[in-house]
Amino acid sequence: MENRISFIKLALAGAVAVCFSHSALATETGVDNVGAGSDGMFVAPLDLASLPDNLFVFDLYYNHYSATKFNSAILGGDIPDFKVNSNSIIPRVDYLSGITLPGGGRLAGYLAVPFTKVTVSFPDFVGGVNKDSRDGLGDIQFAPIILWGFGKNLTVGTGLEVTVPTGKYDATRLANTSNNFYTYKPVFPITWQPNDNVEVSTKLSYSFNQKNKDTDYRSGQIFHFDYSLTYKVADNLHLGVNGYYFKQTTDDKQYGEAVTDVMGMPVSNGNRGQAFAIGPAVHLTFLKYASAELRWEKEFDARNRPEGQTVWAKVSLPYLF
């Protein structure tokens, strides 16, 4: 689903452009549609064979993200007095069909429609501050998924998530609710319960970003995974840790060439971003298939992207067709 970091990094790109002239617009700073940290516990449904046909699950996500640190190779290190705050509401519909494909997989999918407000402030290096805020529809994401159940305690899946640039974008603005490019991302969700008390989940992905047509900038490919490890402390309550790892694997390009720094020199690391995050998580089940969760994640070792902290809250409610 659409991630607050993607909005943040796009916004900072505009701020850098304002501060350092149009040539600095090459600093889109690793804009991404990853949605890092959005998927936590029980990312794939367990005991798949027992689940009914045509099962809809209505999810509502809330995300708050804040950061006061941004590391940029293009600007030569940490950016002083950088601040960003973002709040997002993301309705999502998951669907599990009764269609069984060759090999035993069940056809499924999801659609997420984010609404976000992001505020960015950034010094102009002449004693003032550039500040902008924007809110509205973000970039919609959808994915067809195939899920395989291996007994009651292991489910694995594969799918293709597509991000469509449906939000607001203006290359001259500091804040935007769209990245202004498509992303095609193979995803691999896995949930495993090695025993009745322990849950392990991960969602691996690899992003192929397309070009931003307004800036002729193409962000590099990204490997990413969310992870969760929890323990059942009561019949309907799990506690544990969760987080994510993000690593850009190819260089950013603009006009088909290497990204340059503010002095016009190629950036040695291709403006590649990375980050690691970890924090506590709570997962509560109620009714038959309903659940609620609350997660906090602190980022570490971020490069060419903001480093901050985030809160995720999620409620999932089932509906049988």
Image (cartoon, grey):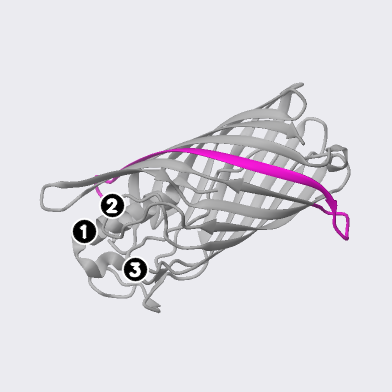
Pick out the residue farthest to the front: 321
Residue for badge 3: 215
Kind of residue at badge 2: Leu
Please give left or right for residue 306 compared with residue 165 in the image: left
Do residues under tags 1 and 2 come within 8 Å of each other at their CB atoms? yes
Q: Residue 102 magenta-drawn?
A: yes
Kind of residue at badge 1: Val
Pick out the residue farthest to the bottom: 256
Pick out the residue farthest to the left: 126
> Where are the magenta residues, as a range?
80-106
* Image spot of residue 133 (x, y percent): 29, 43
Kind of residue at badge 3: Thr
Disc 2 crowd, CA 10 A, few/some/many (<14, 14-19, 20+): many
The residue lying at 13 percent from left, 47 percent from top is: 128
Disc 3 crowd, CA 10 A, few/some/many (<14, 14-19, 20+): some
Q: Secondary structure at mark 1?
A: helix
Q: Secondary structure at mark 3?
A: loop
Residue for badge 1: 18
